[in-house]
Amino acid sequence: MKNHRSFRIVRASALLSLLGLAIPSMAEQVYISNEKDNTLSVIDLDSLKLISTIAVGQRPRGITFNKDFSQLYICASDSDSVQVMDVKSQEIIANLPSGEDPEQFALHPNNKHLYISNEDNAVVTVVDTEKREVISQIDVGLEPEGMAVSPDGKWVVNTSETSNMLHWIDSGTHKLIDNTLVGQRPRHVEFSDDGKTLWASSEIGGTVSVIDVATRTINREYSFHIPGVYKDKIQPVGITLTHDNRLAFVALGPANHVAVIDIAQQKVIKYLLVGRRVWHLALNSDETRLISSNGISGDVSVIDVKSLAVLKSIKVGRFPWGVAVKP
């Protein structure tokens, strides 16, 4: 029966192609980690509806897909594990050794090495995802959190919240090479697609620093001012950039807004009101939609990138944190 069904699907696709009609494709899906529910929420990006809820480990935070989107890695922080979920079956198929309290991570472009920040013991753990074993642990500053790998795979950068530093790790040797001092409590780092700049949010400092990768020094700093919002509530966390390096989006935490930065003009051009305690952000594959996770209000906001307008809020689990989009 399975072979007959597959044959019918192939024959139908061939007929549509002959008629010059588009072959329907699956809608993009947004995966959200819910800290307090120990679940993932899955949203259909066409219908903007919640379509699935998946039980995972305790206090899921950072989430990221592998290169072909067949697997999703999940930082199950209170389980002291990075879980591997098979996306098709939505089942956990492995638990990777991760060190204590994994919070965020970044996957190397080689699709093999996963760099994990361990908040409780001030190290970055490097895991070989194929062998499912730890291959290195690197001492960094106190309370490491944010992680990013440069597009060329050369640099791994970690933020330490208490040390107020970015730590530059050589991915070839797994040695700490340099440190960059930034504002108070850095939470997230994001490389531009060309690899020339690194953006870092400082939650308590209320700023975002733009670092020149070649010199590892700050060449620009943004601060934020929202009418009617107290300055101490403006706490930058998640950052995402468009592929053409035209726009940067910054989640401003308890300010309940997303800042939009025009990179060429080097200025904030808009503040978008979203849900309460906005944590992290992700763009879909063609960058027409931006999704924010809003922790306290228990929802996500879907933003139209062209018009810079919020389209809809969608309820998910309790305290949504991480965001990842599957094409």
Image (spheres, rainbow, N blue to C red):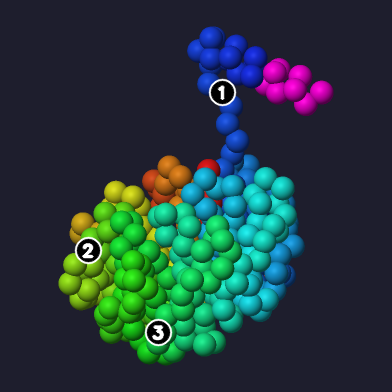
Tell which of 79 and 184 is nearer to you.
79
Tell which of 315 and 58 is nearer to you.
58
Tell which of 294 and 123 is nearer to you.
123
Residue 322 position, x and y percent, is: 55, 65
Residue 279 seen in render: no
Q: Nearer the viewer, mark 3 or mark 1?
A: 3
Residue 26 seen in render: yes
Residue 238 position, x and y percent, is: 44, 68
Name the side, left or right, on which 95 lies relative to 272. right
Residue 26 position, x and y percent, is: 60, 36
**Residue numbers of the magenta segment:** 1-9
Task: State the mark number for residue 230.
Answer: none
Proximity of marks 1 and 2: CB atoms separated by less than 8 Å: no
User: From what the image shows, is residue 52 above or below residue 208?
Assistant: above
Residue furthest out toward the top: 19
Q: Quadrant of residue 193?
A: bottom left
Could you tell me how far apart the alpha carbons at marks 3 and 1 are, in whole angstroms? 50 Å
Task: State the mark number for residue 140.
Answer: 3
Helix, strand or loop status at disc 2: loop
